[in-house]
Image: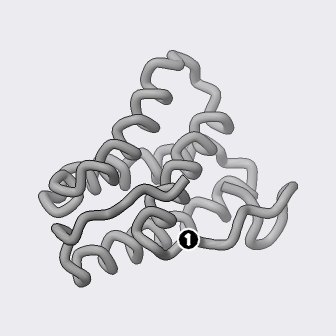
Amino acid sequence: MSVYVSASMNPIAREQVQVQIAATIRAGAPKYNAGDARGCFQLYFKTYNSLLQDPQVRGQRNVAHILERQLDQVKTSRQENWDKNAWTLRHGFDEVLETLGKALAPPAEGRGVGVGV
């Protein structure tokens, strides 16, 4: 679901957020595909926390809300289900990218090159 983004995030900051998320997905997906769901989750979790420290992201309430909501889901699950938690964070990344106007292609089914979280 795409949410209206106010003009408060400048285009440079918006692009930096998009690039950071895309780079994290590019680094995390191969970990996941190699069977390291925990490593993928940890990388995604680190990026979530980094983004939430950014004043531009914090000022963008709808983007910050998406990130906080997904982190809350992971934190309240109280499970070390790395696969599920990695996907929870990935879906949040996809929602943020869509909200910012640059959605990635939907993830393919199964595991393989370019597939995964």
Residue 65 versus residue 110 in the image, above or below: above
Please state the horizontal and vertical placement of residue 19, each as a whole percent of the image.
40, 77
Q: Quick one: which residue is furthest to the bottom in this view? A: 12
Please state the horizontal and vertical placement of residue 38, each as a whole percent of the image.
59, 41
- Label 1: element kind: loop
Please state the horizontal and vertical placement of residue 18, each as a whole percent of the image.
40, 73
Q: Looking at the rendering, which quadrant does residue 105 occupy?
A: bottom right
**Residue depicted at x 40% and y 28%:** 72
Closest to the observer, 10 or 54: 10
- Please give the count of numbered marks on the rendered protein: 1
From the viewer's perspective, is 32 left or right of 19? right
Dot 1 amino acid type: Ala
Residue 19 versus residue 94 in the image, above or below: below
Can you say which quadrant of the picture contains the C terminus? Answer: bottom right
**Residue depicted at x 68% and y 53%:** 32
From the viewer's perspective, is 32 left or right of 98? right
**Residue depicted at x 42% and y 45%:** 45
Residue 41 versus residue 112 in the image, above or below: above
Task: Identify the residue under disc 1.
Answer: 103
**Residue depicted at x 49% and y 58%:** 2
Label 1 CA crowd tier, 10 Å (few <14, some 14–19, many 20+): some
Closest to the observer, 43 or 72: 72
Residue 107 versus residue 45 in the image, above or below: below
Q: Quick one: which residue is furthest to the right in this view? A: 110
Which colour style is shown? one colour
Closest to the observer, 9 or 72: 9
